[in-house]
Amino acid sequence: MRNIPSVVDNDRAYWASGADGLLRLPFCAACDRWFFPPAGTCPSCSGEVGFRDTSGTGTVFTYTVNVQRYKPDLPTPYVVALIELDDQSGLRIPANVVGCEPDDVKIGMRVEVSFEPATSRDEPDGELFVPVFTPSDSGTGAESGGDRR
Amino acid sequence: MSSYPEQDAIISGIGISDIGRKTRTSGIDLTMQSVRAAIADAGLEPTDIDAILTLGDTPADETARHLGIEPEKLGGPYGDAGLLAPVQQAAVAVGEQRARHVLVYRTVQMMGGTVDRPKRSGEKPRPRRDPRPVMSDVPYLLAADAYSAANWLAMHCRRHMYEYGTTREQLGAIALNARTNAALNPAAVFRDAMTMDDYLGARAVSTPFGLLDCDVPVDGSIAVVVSHRDHGSEAPNPAIRFAAIGGASGVGGWTQRPDYPKMAATEAASTLWSRTDLTPADVDIAELYDGFTFLTLAWLEALGFCGDGEGGPFVEGGIRIGRDGELPLNTYGGQLSAGRMHGYWVLHEACLQLRREAGDRQVAKPLDVAAVSVGGGPIAGCLLLTR
């Protein structure tokens, strides 16, 4: 079971979005854009914020294989990455890449979301999930995540 | 009056405590060593100090009590410089004549290697969220088990390697340069020779960072006295002037900058250069933050010593950044080898070198301008110092 250090009003929908297998991110209808991290108002126009489904597919924008043991009960090594979602250029979320050897992860690798059940002391009864990403063979929709400038 | 308030301020005194690993010396004892040394170095008595600024361990009121003084409260307008904020606030306050002598110090003590603290019964929960916008993406990094700045900055480093072809050996040149300089610094904690094989063979921490990409936690305290420049003629030691200061508010946090892997250093450097006629070509020596090797590389680029993505070739082989090179870098051994004084040893060393008091490691060429930078990710501050 994963742990979410804190759940607040602004991001409850993000942590709950795994219940139906869809990754939802904060979205400003006025700007017609997703943004991250979640916030009470749109960082661009200060307008009202909702949550909107994403495709849940993307590319590895950057990553690290963590080897250091920061918690005694957390096995290492594991991959931490920034995933750039196909839905919008520059839309990135931090997440683990699982389902492959850590050394096989590369920048530009195609991935798709899945969810691991989680708990949080802020929401002891909540149905919460941490989004993770697994390698996928799906098309090459993303440009900016993998393109070398 | 000068164009910017910091230009009427000087560093009139510097002081450093014993530095060591697990010294079992209390924070206040370390602090008293550094602050008494800095006050004496400035030719002052504790009662001359108008205000004390610090951050982190060993609060200012405790230090004031031990010095037997009751300084004024001093709030500065310049809060965006991260670890250097107290120095910049002091310089601005002195320049605006809100104080004449301000004592600034940083005291650090080694911390454990785990995030979870043992909970004491009845302990109140800590605030759930850091209110600072620059930290707004941290909860999501933590949920991905990315607990350390090593993880967060390793991702910047990996992207830099991808975009520009930066290599481990190039990062290693920064670590080796630090160790070479530390060998000549009696206060540095790691002074034994290091080879590139040692560097490349060190155990991985968070790829591409290995152990020797990471700085060394120590106990210690460093202090400076920031005075109005008209004290310079009375002070026993050469005055070090602030040519410019820069800081950044950290838009984009740790993960969201459109120009990732750039960091707040970019804006801090831009502010710095906007406040002076000096240019990167005028800088004789650079003391740049190296909490991780990659941060020094990033600061070299941000401050304009080389172009975007050119940091790797700039440091490769270490000749250019050696003590006899065109831009001597981290001449005291850096946080990588001398010890993690959270940005205050770079400041101390810049002053020492400009005063030509750096002993065996004194850079031989004339030194008029030093660049000092501190921070990584969305936290950045920098100084341009002159004799």
Image (cartoon, coloured by chain):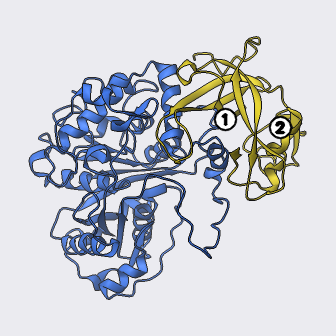
Chain colours: A yellow, B blue
The residue closer to the viewer here, B190 or B350, is B190
Where is A64 relative to B32, above or below? above
* Residue drawn at (79%, 57%) of the image: A124
The residue singled out by tag 2 in the image is A18
Q: Which chain carries label 1?
A: A
Where is B334 relative to B1, above or below? above
Which three-letter amino acid code belongs to the residue tagged 2? Gly
Q: Earlier in the sequence, mark 1 or mark 2?
A: 2
The residue closer to the viewer here, A120 or A24, is A120
**Rendering coords of residue B139 (x, y %):** 66, 49
Where is A123 relative to B26, above or below? above
Viewer can see residue A106: no
* Residue drawn at (25%, 67%) of the image: B12
Q: In which quarter of the image is the N terminus of chain B?
A: bottom left
Residue lying at the far left in this picture: please name it.
B360
Q: Mark 2 lies on which chain?
A: A
* Residue drawn at (19%, 44%) of the image: B182
Which three-letter amino acid code belongs to the residue tagged 1? Ala
* Residue drawn at (64%, 17%) of the image: A109
Position of A58 with respect to B11 (left or right) is right
> Regarding mark 1 in the picture, which secondary structure is present there?
strand
**Rendering coords of residue B114 (x, y %):** 48, 53
Q: In which quarter of the image is residue A121?
A: bottom right
**Number of residues whose C-alpha sits closer than 10 Å to that of mark 2, classed few (under 14), some (14–19) or many (20 or more):** many
The residue singled out by tag 1 in the image is A95
Viewer can see residue B46: yes
Residue lying at the far front in this picture: please name it.
A73
The residue closer to the viewer here, A11 or A91, is A11
**Rendering coords of residue B98 (x, y %):** 44, 76
Specify whether disc 1 shares its chain with disc 2: yes
